[in-house]
Image (spheres, helix red, strand yellow):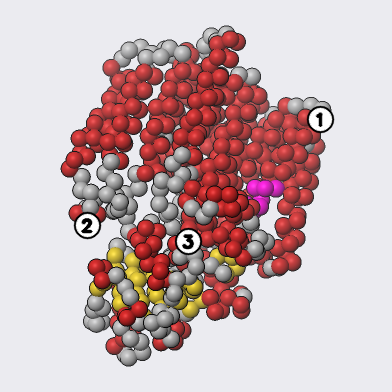
Amino acid sequence: MIGAQPSLLSQRHFAKWALLLLAIVFVSIYLLPLGARPLVVPDEARYGVIPSEMVDTGEWVVPHLSGIRYFEKPVLGYWMTAVSFLAFGENAFALRLPAALMTGFAIAAIVLVVRRWTNRWDIAALAGVVLATCLEPVILGTTAVLDAPFSALITLTIACFYLAWKASGPARYGLLVAAGVACGAAFLVKGFLAVALPGMILAPWLAWSGRWRDLLTLPWIPAAVAVLTVLPWSWAVHGRAPEFWHYFFWVEHVHRFTAGDEAQHPESWWFFMPILLLGLIPWVFAAPLAIRGLLWRGFGSAESRLLLCWLFIPLLFFSVSSGKLPTYILPCFPPAAALLAIGLVGYFDVIKPRGRLSELVPGGILIAIGLVAVACWPFVPTEQVDGGPWQDGGTWRLPLLGAALVLWGLADWKSNRTHDGRSRVLIGGLAVAAFFVMVPMLMPTGWMTIAKSPVSWLTPWRPLAERSTVLAGRDFIHVAGWTWPDAEIRLFGEPGEMRWGVENFEEHAATHVTRDEFTDVVQQATDDRPVMLVATHPEIYVKRINKLVLAGAIKQPAISIDRNVVLAVWPQSAGIRVDNQKSLDHRE
C-alpha cells in the first residue's frame, strides 16, 4: 500500500527547502550552542587535556593524560581536537567542535544513502532531519567524546561501500577507496571495532541479497586502503611505545568484551533496547506509524535489508558484550533515522489527518508544560544557596524553555493538520529543533555536585594552584589539568584508569603520589610553594587528614568543602578564600 507519488517539480521544490532547513537545524543545534554548556567530567575534561598536551609538548604519537602514558584509544580523535584548539583556542567550543562536525558528516552520509535508494532528494533530506533531531545524536554530537567521530566514520564507511556497490567504472573504485579511508580513520579513533562493525553489517547484507560474488571481491580495496591509512601511526607508536598494542588489544578490547561481571560497566543483555528507544526521542513516539509504513512498502529491496542489518546487528553485538555504555550504539541511529523517515512518509501519504481530538493531545501537553515553565519563572530562586537550579542564577532559561515547548506544541498541531506526508515529517523535525537548541543551557548546575561540573568552581583557585604542587584525585585529575593548565598537577591515591601508565613506566613514578608518600609531600609545603589537594568524597579525605594531624605527621591545612568536593591547602598561611573556609573537625 503506497500513496501517490508527488510530481518531479514538487519533489525538487520540497527538497530545496528541506535541505536548506536541515542545514539551519544543524547549525542551530550542533554549532551555535557548543560553548553554552559547562564541561562535564571526567569525559570532556579527559578529551580536552590529552590533545592540549599534544599541542604543548609536541608529542603527537603517544597519547599522554596529565603527563602519564594513556593507551585507552588511538590518536585521531585527539588530533581532531588538537587541530580545533590550534584554530579556535582551548575552550569549550573548540573542544566539542570535532564531534559536531563529524555528526554533520554522518547526517550527510545518510542523506546520500537514502537519495541513492529512493532517487528522491526530498525523502533523503527528511532522513537527515530525523537523525539531526534524535536525542542521543544531539547529546553526543555536542559533547566532547569520541563516540560521535567514530560513529560518523562508520557511517561514512558503510555509505561509501553501498554507493560503490551501486556505481560502476572509476566511480566505484573511488568510492571503495573512500570507504577504506573512512574505515582506517575510524580505527584510528577507537580501534578494532572499526573493522568489526562494517564487516558484521556488510557481509550478512550481501549474503542476504544473494550477492556472493560481491562479498568475495568488493571488500579487498577498502581493506587494503584501511591498512595503508592505519599503518604509519601504528608503526610509529610501536616504535615509541611498543607496549601500546598489547594493552590496547587485550585489555581495551578482549577483556572489555569477555570479562563478564569484572568488565568495566557490566550491564544486562537487554540494556541497549531502552537506550535505543530513549535515544530516538521524540521520533520513537511515531515509530509504530513508521513500522506500518515500512511494512506496506516491504523489505524486498537490498537497501531496506542493508538498513535492517545496520540497525540490528550492532545492537545484538553490543548486547553480547560484557561492558556496556549508552554511547556504544550511536552507529545504530543513522539507519534508524532513515527507516523512520521513509516509513513515516509512506504512512502519512496513505493515512491523512482526520481532525480527531486525540491528535491535539500531544501538542496540548507540550503547550501546557511550556506555559507552566513561564508561570514558574518569577518564583524560582536565582541564588544557588536558596536552591536555585543554575549556578549562575540564570532563571531566564525558564521562559525560553517554555517558549520552545509552546512552539513545539503549536508545530505539532500544525503537523497533524497537514495532508502532505513529507511536510508532516519536516514540521515534526523543525518543531523539536527549538527545544534541542535550549538543551545545552538547561544543565541544573546549581543542583549538581561540583564533581560533575567543576570548572566554574575551580577557576577562582587558579592563581593559588599555579604556584602550588597540586595533588588531584583520579576523579579530578582531568579537570584540574583543563582548568589550571600551568599548574604542576600530580595524580594522588588510586590511579583508576591511569593504572597501566603508572604501574608500567618508571618515568611516571614522580607524577603519581601514593597514600604512603602523601605525608612526605605535604611536609615539604611552604608559603612560596604550597601543596593543594583536590578530590571528591570529602568525608573520606577529611577523616584521613584528621588522623595525620592528630598524629603530628602533618600540620593542619586550610580547607574548603562544597558539594562533594574537598580542597585543602598546606600551609594555612598560603591563602584560601575565607568565605568558604571550614575548620577541620578533629573527631575520628
Which segment did they paint magenta?
A: 184-192
565 with respect to 297 (left or right)? left
Q: Report which residue position mark 1 lands on.
A: 170
585 with respect to 161 (left or right)? left
Assign a secondary structure to mark 3. Answer: helix
Q: Report which residue position mark 3 lands on.
A: 482
Q: Position of residue 156 (x, y in %)?
A: 64, 38
What residue is rendered at 55% in x and 11% in y?
10
Outermost residue on the right side: it is: 169
Closer to the observer: label 1 or label 3?
3
Please report contact status of discs 2 and 3: CB closer than 8 Å, yes or no: no
83 over 204 or under it: above or below: below
Assign a secondary structure to mark 2. Answer: helix
Q: Position of residue 559 (x, y in %)?
A: 30, 74
Q: Report which residue position mark 2 lands on.
A: 385
What residue is rendered at 65% in x and 24% in y?
116
Q: Position of residue 301 (x, y in %)?
A: 64, 23
Mark sitting on residue 77? none
Q: Is residue 323 visible?
A: no
Q: Earlier in the sequence, mark 1 or mark 2?
A: 1
